Image (cartoon, coloured by chain):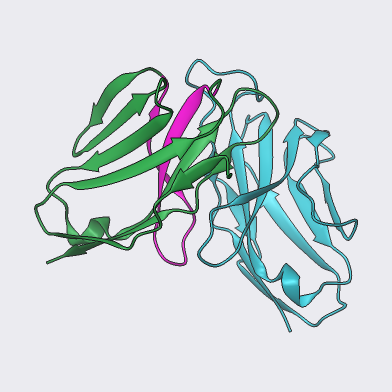
């Protein structure tokens, strides 16, 4: 079992809809959780970080964390074609020296 | 301003050649990470530096891979006798604090990456 699991997609949503991206992790003691956006041929760009259970909103983006169920999600409201990218979930387990990344979910927003 | 920079952006090497990839982290960042990203995959950890100390090299795939950060800022990832399976994007990331420190300051910021192609 990988440390971080994501549905690779592709996920397609129409412009203006809500895109929902999900991620589960295996280390129950994990401390910090991140969503990165990666456009094709580019490096990962931080979208959101979340550290506590519940929701965290930033503009059109909402991250949700449920430590008991070991999942973290990202909601994108009013999806735009420019949101089309691969979204990477990353987890800091709080021990050791590395973050663990999922394989990413490919999102396409259809105009 | 600066973000994390990497050079070269693209590198083509013949099998058996040595390559050196450079990373300039954000000024003042304590932690520096190297990752390898294959097509369609997430970044895979290679090695970690806290200032000049290489505290973790558990992800380096073989002894042909070597990394250094002698003055605690710029880092170089060297790959000796490159093989075709080394072809990937090599990403460098830095963060403000040492690993194990959180409080919301452990975000990693990525450079643009170096795309290595071994022929």
Q: Position of residue A32 (x, y in %)?
A: 49, 25
Q: Quadrant where the C terminus of chain A lies? A: bottom left
Between residue A79 and residue B5, name the one nearer to us: A79
Return the x and y of residue A58 as percentages of the image width and height: 24, 31
At which x and y percent is residue A30? 54, 24
Q: Residue at x 54, y 37 (%)?
A: B108
Quarter holding the N terminus of chain A?
top right
Chain letter of the cyan region: B
Nearest the camera: A68 or A96?
A68
Residue B43 seen in render: yes
Rendering coords of residue B18 (x, y %) = 86, 70
Q: Which residues are magenta?
A: A30-51
Residue A99 is covered by the magenta coloring: no
As drawn, A68 above or below A99: above
Residue located 47% across and 67% down the image? A41
Q: Colour of chain A?
A: green
Q: Is residue A86 left or right of residue B42?
A: left
Q: Quadrant of residue A85?
A: bottom left
Q: In which quadrant of the rendered view does residue B96 lie?
A: top right
Residue A3 versus residue A67 in the image, above or below: below
Residue A37 sits inside the magenta stretch: yes
Q: How many marks?
A: 0
Q: Quadrant of residue A15?
A: bottom left
- Residue at horizontal 40 percent and vertical 57 percent from the top: A8
**Is residue B1 among what the camera can see?**
no
């Amino acid at each position: 079992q990988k440390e971080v699991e994501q549905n690779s997609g592709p996920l397609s949503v129409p412009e203006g809809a809500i895109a929902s991206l999900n991620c589960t992790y295996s280390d129950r003691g994990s401390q910090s959780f991140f969503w990165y956006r990666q456009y094709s041929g580019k490096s990962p760009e931080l979208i959101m970080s979340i550290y506590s259970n519940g929701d965290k909103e930033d503009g059109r983006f909402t991250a949700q964390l449920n430590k008991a169920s070991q999942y973290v999600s990202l909601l994108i409201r009013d999806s735009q074609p420019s949101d089309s990218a691969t979204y990477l979930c990353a987890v800091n387990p709080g021990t050791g020296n590395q973050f663990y990344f999922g394989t990413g979910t490919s999102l396409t927003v259809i105009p | 301003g600066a973000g994390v920079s990497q050079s070269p952006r693209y590198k083509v090497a013949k099998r058996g050649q040595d390559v050196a990839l450079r990373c300039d982290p954000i000024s003042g960042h304590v932690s520096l990470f190297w990752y390898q990203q294959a097509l369609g995959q997430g970044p895979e950890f290679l090695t970690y530096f806290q200032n000049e100390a290489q505290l973790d090299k558990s992800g380096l795939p073989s002894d042909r891979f070597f990394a250094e950060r002698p003055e605690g800022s710029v880092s170089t990832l060297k790959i000796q006798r490159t093989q075709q399976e080394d072809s990937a994007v090599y990403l460098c990331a830095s963060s403000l604090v040492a690993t194990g420190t959180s409080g919301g300051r452990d975000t990693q910021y990525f450079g643009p990456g170096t795309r290595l192609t071994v022929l």
